[in-house]
Image (cartoon, helix red, strand yellow):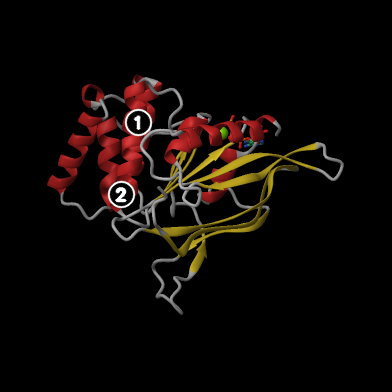
Amino acid sequence: MAIKYEQKDTILHVENLSVAYGEKVIISNVNFTEKDTVRADKAQGQTIAFVGRSGRGKSTLFRALTGLEAPTTGMVLIPDYEKKIVNGQQPAKKVKEGDVGFVDQKYTLFRHKTIYQSLKFACRKTSLSDAEKEEKIKQYLHDWGLDSCKNQYPNELSGGQRQRTAILEQLLSSGYYMVLDEPFSGLDVGNIQNVKDAFWLINDSNELNTIIFSTHDIDLAVELADSLYVLGYGKNEKGNLVQTGTVLKHFDLKEMGLAWHDGLTKDHLDLVKEVKEIMLAS
Ligand SMILES: Nc1ncnc2c1ncn2[C@@H]1O[C@H](COP(=O)(O)OP(=O)(O)OP(=O)(O)O)[C@@H](O)[C@H]1O
Ligand SMILES: [Mg+2]
């Protein structure tokens, strides 16, 4: 049975976005709008997935969404919560570096900080007391299997340990938005579950919380997302593929009655198949 929800204010608006590196246009004509999803019975955040074959521009798009890469054309708008509401709508602003938490594909960490020191630093802008920070960090280190290496530096960690530290850093420091580039790659089954649980937790704790992630695991994308975009190469007038990424298809899983499910039903698996076919042709 489809779950009832409403769509309220715009929380992310991307218009005519293109990004080029030098002369080479990587993505172009990217347009989409995401709204705050509201459910009567609970705080419901947003989880938005981007899938697409390697090199189609997912990471490039994410760098533009987080203000790390300046658009060649178009813009990325988010609400400006520092301004007063005008005519029932929160004024928008162009995203800039620092507005949106970002876990990049390389899991960049502070080279000269241990895991513990990095997490402590990530808490600096929160309103938690010192004791609460300690408690939270201790809990995370335990839950995410990082207790035994909390005093180690990034170059002394495994790939998965680095990745989990990078995700925890953003969990502790981010506002409403969090962009994660391939947060599931290279993790073992237990750690995948940790990240999934973190997604649900973020989703349930504030209706404005918005996770944007990319993955090559289409099953996971369909299981977790309430909104899914397929990025791929577009076609020119002759029907030939052009080497520039764009949004080929958007699936609103809320509307389809597939959002907020535990596990995958047959309808989810049919969607996985459809998404894979679009990807293969792009
Ligand atoms: N800094 C850069 N300078 C020039 N070209 C770049 C740069 N970063 C990425 N590219 C190119 O942009 C294209 C898209 O790369 P991007 O990393 O966005 O793809 P992706 O969809 O994230 O791929 P993957 O699934 O492998 O992570 C690729 O052709 C890549 O070579
Ligand atoms: Mg990438």
The residue identified by callout 2 is 204
Give the number of the mark in front: 2 or 1. 2
Residue drawn at (22%, 22%) of the image: 148
The residue identified by callout 1 is 164
Which residue type carries mark 1? Arg
Label 2, label 1: how far apart the Cα atoms are: 20 Å
Q: For mark 1, does the 10 Å Cα neighbourhood hold few (<14), some (14 to 19), or many (20 or more) residues?
A: many
Residue 112 can be seen, yes or no: no
Q: Nearer the viewer, residue 34 or 187?
A: 34
Residue 243 can be seen, yes or no: yes
Looking at the image, residue 244 sits to the left or right of residue 264; the answer is: right
Which residue type carries mark 2? Asp
Image location (x, y in percent) of residue 194: 31, 31
Residue drawn at (44%, 55%) of the image: 99
Outermost residue toward the right? 238
* Labels 2 & 1 near each other (Cβ < 8 A): no
Image height of 37 relative to 90, above or below: above
Outermost residue toward the left? 131
Quarter holding residue 192: top left
Q: Nearer the viewer, residue 280 or 59?
A: 280
Q: Nearer the viewer, residue 71 or 40?
A: 40
Residue drawn at (30%, 49%) of the image: 204
Quarter of the rendered image showing ligand 1: top right
Image location (x, y in percent) of residue 96: 50, 56
In which quadrant will I find the C terminus? top right
Q: Nearer the viewer, residue 276 or 23?
A: 276
